[in-house]
Amino acid sequence: ELWWCQGDGIESRVETPFGVSSLFQAGVYRMRPRELRLDPLLDDFMGPGNPWGIAFDDFGQSFVIDGAGGVSFLTPASIPAKRRLRLPRIGNPGGYCGIECLGAGNLPGDMQGQFVIGDYKKNQVSRFETREDGAGFKLEWKSPLLRSKHRNFRPIDVKMGPDGAIYIVDWYNPITCHQDDFYRHPERDKTHGRIWRVTPIRGAVKPPSLVGASLARLLEALRSPERWTRLKAKQVLASRQPEEVRAAVRAWSQAAGGNHEGRDLLEAVSVLEWLGRPDEVVLRLLLSSPDHRARAYGVRVLGRWSQKLENLHDLLVKAARDVHPLVRMEAVLAAGQSPRAESVLVSAAAAESKRDRWIEYAFSQAVHHSKRYWLPALRTGQLNFSGVRGGLAAVLGASDSRGVVEEIRKILDGGTIGKEAWDGLALTLAALGEEEDLRAILNSDQMSLALLRAMMERERPGFDVMPPLGRALYHPDIARRIAAVELAAHWKVKELYKAVMKYAEGEGVDPVLREVALRSLGALGERSTVDFLKSQVGGESEVRPSALFSILQLAPEEGTRIAVKLLKELEDRETIMTIFRDFTSREGGPALLAKELEGAAIKDGQAALLRGAWVSTGLVARELEAVLDLLAGAGGVQAYDEGVIRNLVAAAKKGSASRGREVFHSSKASCSACHKADRGGQSVIGPDLSAVGSGLLPDRVVTEVLWPRRQVKEGYALSRIITRDGDVQQGYVQASRDEELLLLRDFASNSLHEIPRGSIMKQEEVGSLMPPTAGELDQQELVDLFAYLFSLDGEE
């Protein structure tokens, strides 16, 4: 197979004998040259946003790196699925380009099988090893292979050579980004570049001469510790007479009673793959290996050869019940790429065992991707789940199709499945079913917490929902009562006002339940409820934000006046941030609060606290920001001045990085509220700055800090979406193939929200999240802050 990455901003449509293969965003392509089959993987923002390299370990497990998004275990995404399901990441975000798996006899033993990557932002070649984690892997960073103090050292590719040396492509450039600096920037280096050769102290190895070698010698070369030698031996074998090589491979695999190491048998099978000559005898030897890594690869090949060899279905079902989760996952992946209806039974067999996050990802994509084959067979009674009945509910639940609704109804009505399976099917029916299905679920004795929460995704049905919700409101489980209150508010079931009010009053009520009830009264109550809510605002501090939230819904102007009174005296930063978020969640809320704050008398220290809390939310509302700046005495943003930039860059050379670190983490600057740097802060809202000193030019860093909205990086322009019911969401708009949906990526959680375009009243771009807080710092604080930022080169 040939694998390659497609970067961000590219759209491909390629004609193949199997139809048009399309990849609309960044992703990965897999090509099988012998068949001319081209599979697009991880389309529609399912994986890395800008993938720049793929590598395989010694047992065929694949990993992909991202220019901005870390390291991902790629194998679970081997199905060319179009259903958007985000692939989990195993490695931290960073600037990675080029990856290689090490394997040579002259390398130290502990480096064998480790990976090296071009970590160009940190001016180093980073190194990590993988450790098994269920069906997947965890990543453990090691000390860098190579590191430079020179900011122009930009490793962008790493490869093992035939001599056992490690070759590193060094782009050698002070500027790494095409988005932030114009193409004719004088600092761009267009003439230099280097290739480094790194050899162990024990020296290089001598590449073997393989072209004229005998079959026996070529087969023994498959045992070599050199990855290069094993690869080239397979290439030479693939150029020989196919049937002669096939016979030799079988004989070699069966020698000594088939007592080869698992990797040896894997290499033998891969020779047959190169030749395009399936061999069941050799494959069965691999599938019976005591090494689960070898068995897992064998199952992958079993899936590919199942169209050419007969009666292999039972082997796949057996693999789906293997003791090791990696083998079970490979069975699911094989089933998901098969055009045979009965392959879904393999996935069902795997579902009878425990599923970790990697198997769950593969399972969900496999069932959904292959339903065009198995669903018609299920409807016509041609598919028999009797041998894997324990996995049937999981299959139907993962299919995410209205076409299975009738089958789900029959199973639920039959009453022959367990509670866990019933819940899984009912969740699917809650998402896809009609009103009568919702009625049956709500009135069922098996109504669960998960189902109550799932109902939040549906509009209020036309039938009377008060009786089932009323029962849930008094369920012994507190979590279920909380979910019932939230659903009553979401559906505006005003008939339950008195019951919710009882919880809000708080006598002997769980504190979380009471807060949820108070926040729900705004949707259930009337204007007369405001007096009660005002009494709660004046009471216990824990419930003030919840009561205020409901007042803002019932009496916005009065609620704003109360909010300002609270903001004058509140000391808890988190409570202040909650109030700010509640105002920005409704259309016109920030303007209303800004108007009331404008004439308020607020002490300097309190005003600074309010402004710092606002900055920490990461939200954008220009009118509110302006008032908070004024109250805190923060100076306006000075005009862009290249002279100021030059002076600060020069002065920072004599500044104190240690004092600058204190400024970075201070409440005055609030940098660490959004950014991670030198093990401090969090990179939830803003980018990781741990290597900003080596990644960006000094003048660029100064510009970004002092004038953050002068040039917003592509993909980081915040948008505000206002829906017709007045809800407000802020995030980054992402491309979508569905013209009826707008995809909005939440800047804090990185989750994607689907918003029907028909529900959108207004969409506007509000610029960068980063506030110009550096304007509050004095000259020495700025100099020290930049000295610290310039020192950040990614080294822990």
Image (cartoon, rainbow, N blue to C red):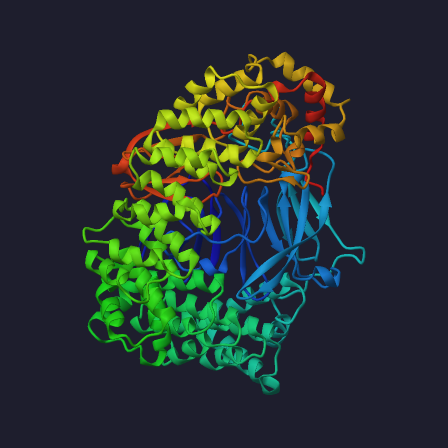
Q: Is residue 62 above or below residue 772?
A: below
> Can residue 36 be seen by looking at this rendering?
no
Residue 691 percent across, percent down from the top left: 65, 37
Outermost residue to the front: 507
Residue 168 percent across, percent down from the top left: 66, 46
Outermost residue to the right: 201
Q: Is residue 231 above or below residue 27?
A: below
Residue lying at 68% horizontally and 28% vertically, measured from the top left: 663
- Of residues 570 and 107, the one nearer the viewer is 570
- Of residues 374 and 356, the one nearer the viewer is 356
In the image, 112: left or right of 84? right
Rendered image quadrant of residue 756: top left
Q: How many marks?
A: 0
- Of residues 271 and 54, the one nearer the viewer is 54
Residue 56 percent across, percent down from the top left: 56, 59
> Can residue 305 be seen by looking at this rendering?
yes
- Of residues 792 and 412, the one nearer the viewer is 412
Screen quadrant of the C terminus? top right
Q: Is residue 601 above or below residue 107?
A: above
In the image, 262: left or right of 731? right
Residue 466 percent across, percent down from the top left: 25, 53
